[in-house]
Image: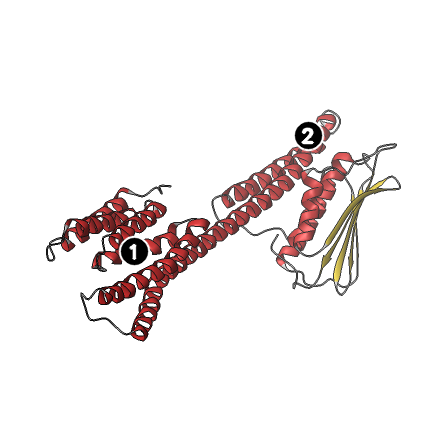
């Protein structure tokens, strides 16, 4: 029933009510009944925000007391206007409509009270008796004026509540959009981190194993392997620093890999013991930066998986088939004999599929005739491309 208010809000409402009552009471010399009505309306004014329902009930009680005591309308009755405003502004669904009904019923009651009171006073001879038609005209004039004032106050409260709700909805929408953007950024960084770390560690492990076996028979090969390990580790460390920096910024702090970097990737993978055959057909077209990054990361992840799970020494084949409307990418590697590789929900396959989808492409990964095949179609047009 009671709404939580800040201390300054409650203090303002109580102070305003006390001020209004204090200003009204000295005007003339109100009798006891009128003083009670004035104080009651001040109480309703004080309760209008902390408890709109209680304020409305209080206003009704003292309005009935006023009519029962045959008191004339008083300036204190203006407290009903902010009370009706509060029922629509702060009240729930039921209280809102109760406030509207109270506005209509209050206007009707006040109009009947004023016009019939004047008519019966004329019949009793205390004042000049008005004509019946005059009473009807006066009644409707009072009724329309009272409905306009009371319903307008209620309507203003409803408009204020609607505006406040719309503003809160906009704020929630902005917060939700920001949260989605942050989550997308985190997912992108997680994909890049997985690609960089998984690829680099696979190269380092392969080179370290090769160096260990070749150390006694071919020290030169061991030195070359250690050089590759050092270069790969330094490159991975630089990439990881960039990704960690992106956690503190909205935009990438360094250029992302592109198609021109695929040659260096092939050399790095080949130096790690996985021969890479590249077959490119068709006329290359200009791809947007996001699409180039998607192609690079898909090739990188597919070759890294081939190096980790493929048949040792069998190599991998990368096919790039350019068409006017799209680039068809296919990376295939032979699996060990009788091996079955599941396409699970890990970061690698899921990340490649999401990268292709983000630039409007398609992706598939499957086992075909003893080979594991990763295939992707990347649109050449940038109309559907989005930053990866």
Front position in the image: 246 or 92: 92
Q: Residue furthest top?
A: 216
Q: Position of residue 217 (x, y in %)?
A: 75, 26
Left or right of residue 151: residue 318: right
Answer whether residue 209 is visible to the viewer in this image.
Answer: yes
Image coordinates of residue 97 in percent, x first then y, are 44, 54
Q: Which mark is residue 208?
A: 2
Q: Looking at the picture, how far across and down is residue 301, in whole percent?
A: 70, 43
Q: Is residue 197 left or right of residue 271?
A: left
User: Residue 64's x, y, as percent?
Assistant: 29, 52
In the picture, the disc for residue 134 is none
The answer to whether residue 371 is left or right of residue 9 is right
| In this view, 156 is above or below 4 | below
Cα–Cα span, label 2 and label 1: 86 Å
Picture mark count = 2
**Residue 80 image label:** 1
């Amino acid at each position: 029933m009671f709404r939580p208010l800040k201390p300054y809000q409650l203090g303002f409402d109580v102070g305003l009510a006390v001020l209004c009552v204090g200003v009204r009471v000295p005007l003339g010399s109100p009798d006891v009944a009128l003083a009670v009505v004035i104080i009651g309306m001040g109480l309703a004014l004080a309760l209008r925000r902390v408890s709109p329902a209680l304020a409305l009930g209080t206003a009704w009680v003292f309005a009935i007391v006023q009519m029962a005591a045959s008191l004339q309308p008083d300036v204190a009755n203006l407290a009903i206007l902010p009370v009706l405003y509060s029922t629509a502004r702060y009240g729930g669904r039921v209280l809102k409509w109760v406030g509207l009904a109270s506005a209509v019923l209050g206007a009707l009651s006040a109009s009947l009270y004023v016009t019939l009171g004047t008519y019966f006073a004329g019949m009793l001879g205390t004042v000049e008796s008005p004509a019946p038609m005059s009473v009807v005209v006066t009644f409707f004039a009072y009724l329309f004026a009272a409905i306009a004032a009371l319903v307008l106050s209620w309507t203003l409260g409803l408009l204020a509540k609607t505006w406040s709700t719309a503003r809160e909805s906009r704020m929630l929408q902005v917060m939700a959009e920001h949260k989605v953007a942050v989550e997308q950024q985190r997912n992108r960084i997680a994909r890049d981190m997985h690609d960089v770390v998984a690829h680099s560690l696979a190269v380092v492990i392969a080179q370290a194993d090769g160096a260990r076996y070749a150390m006694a028979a071919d020290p030169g090969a061991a030195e070359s392997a250690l050089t590759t390990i050092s270069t790969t580790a330094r490159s991975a460390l630089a990439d990881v620093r960039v990704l960690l920096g992106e956690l503190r910024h909205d935009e990438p702090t360094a250029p992302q890999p592109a198609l021109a970097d695929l040659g260096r990737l092939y050399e790095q993978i080949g130096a790690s013991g996985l021969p890479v055959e590249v077959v490119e057909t068709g006329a290359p077209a200009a791809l947007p930066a996001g699409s180039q990054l998607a192609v690079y990361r898909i090739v990188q992840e597919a070759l890294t998986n081939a190096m980790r799970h493929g048949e040792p020494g069998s190599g991998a084949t990368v096919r790039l088939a350019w068409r006017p409307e799209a680039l068809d990418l296919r990376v295939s590697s032979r699996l060990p004999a009788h091996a079955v590789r599941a396409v699970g929900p890990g970061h690698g396959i899921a990340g490649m599929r999401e990268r292709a989808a983000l630039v409007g492409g398609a992706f598939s990964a499957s086992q075909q005739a003893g080979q594991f095949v990763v295939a992707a179609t990347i649109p050449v047009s940038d109309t559907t491309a989005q930053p990866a």
